[in-house]
Image (cartoon, grey):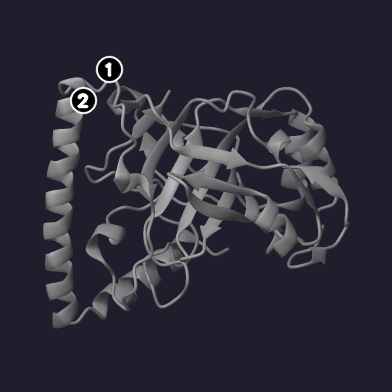
Amino acid sequence: MKTNTFYFSQIKKSVCKLTMSCIVVISVQLLFISCSTDNNTNVTNLENDGDPSIGLERFPLDLISTPIFTTNFPSFVVSAQTPIDIQTKNTIALNKSDLEIHYGKMTLTNVTNNANEELKININKTDSDNNYITISKKRYNLANIHFHYNSEHKIDGIYSKMEIHLVNKAADNSYAVLGVLVELGSVNSTIQKLFQNSPTEADQVNTPNIALSITEMLPEDQGKMYSYIGSLTTPNFGINSDVVNGGPVTWFVFKSKLEISSSQFDFYKSIYTKPNFRNIQPLNKRKVYLIK
C-alpha cells in the first residue's frame, strides 16, 4: 500500500487523460445519475413521507454494485469515493436489508505482510466458494480480509482504533465490502490467532494452514449497519476500469464494534508500524442508509 500523495498523483494523471469522447460519456452518465436521484427521492417520499427517521421498506436498487466497462473515469465513480465521515443524524433509515451473510470457517493459506503497512489474508478458492454474501440474491464471494489503523471510516467525526475490511467479489467483477470497526476491550481469540501467524517482515507470506472462524471477526450485533455506494480505498480506488475492480463498491459498515485488547493492538502495531488509512472523502450528496 502506498501513501495518499501517490494515490492522488495517480488520479490527477489519469484525469488529465480524459478525451472529448469521455466528456460526452460523462455527460450522459451525469444525466443518468440525475434521473436516478430523482427516482430515489420519489421512493423516499412515497414510503416515508420524506421523513428519513420512519424508514424505507424497499431495499434501494442503487446499493447493488455493478461493474463499469470503460477505459475512462466515469464521473460519478470519481465523486463517490471511500472512506467517508458517516454523520448519523443524516442517515436514511432502512427497515429492510437484502444483505445475507454466509460466512463460516476458512483455512489460513496466505497471510501477507503488505510492506509493513497492512495485514492481508487472501482467501483460497475453496474457502471463497464457501464464504459469501448476497445482496438482493446477487452473490459476492469472499476474496480477502485486511486491516487498517486507524479506522478508515469516521462516525460523527470520530475514528475507531482499527477497521477490518472483508472484501467480496461477484462473478461480474463488482465488489461489496463489509467494514468492521474495532475498539479496545476484551481479548479476541480469533484475532489473536491471526496476529500470531502474521509475517513479521515486509512482503513475506505465511502459510500456517490452520482453521479460523470468520464469523468471530464480526461484531455480535450484525443487525444494524450503515450502507452506501463508494469505492475501494487502495489503488486504483475502483475508478480505472482497465482492471477488474472498476466501478462502484457497495459498502456495509457495522454500527456495533468488534473488541480486541490493548495488548493485541500494540502487538499489531509492533509489526505494522505505519498507519494505513486513506483520507476522508467528500460525500458529494450521496445517500447513507442505516439498516435497522
- Which mark is nearer the camera, 2 or 1? 2
* Residue 245 seen anywhere in this rendered image of the structure: yes
Q: Residue 126 carries which label?
A: none
| Residue count near mark 2 (Cα–Cα under 10 Å), binned few <14, some 14–19, many ≥20 | some
**Residue for point 29% across, 70% down:** 73
Q: Which of 207 and 43 is in front in this view?
A: 43
- The answer to whether mark 2 and mark 1 are in CB contact below 8 A is yes
| In the image, residue 8 above or below residue 24 | above
Image quadrant holding the C terminus, namely top left
**Residue for point 68% across, 64% down:** 115
Q: Specify which label sits upstream in the sequence, 2 or 1.
A: 2
Q: Where is residue 138 in the image (x, y as percent from the top left)?
A: 46, 51
| Residue count near mark 1 (Cα–Cα under 10 Å), binned few <14, some 14–19, many ≥20 | some
Q: Position of residue 171 (x, y in %)?
A: 51, 64
The secondary structure type at the circle numbered 1 is loop
Q: Which of 216 and 192 is in front in this view?
A: 216
Mark 2 to mark 1: distance in Å? 9 Å
The residue type indicated by label 2 comes to Glu
Q: Position of residue 125 (x, y in %)?
A: 70, 64
Q: Is residue 37 left or right of residue 81?
A: left
| Quadrant of res 31 | bottom left
**Residue for point 33% across, 36% down:** 288
* Residue 282 seen anywhere in this rendered image of the structure: no
**Residue for point 16% across, 36% down:** 41
The secondary structure type at the circle numbered 2 is helix
Q: Where is residue 119 in the image (x, y as percent from the top left)?
A: 70, 54
What residue would you read off at disc 1? Answer: 54
What residue would you read off at disc 2? Answer: 47
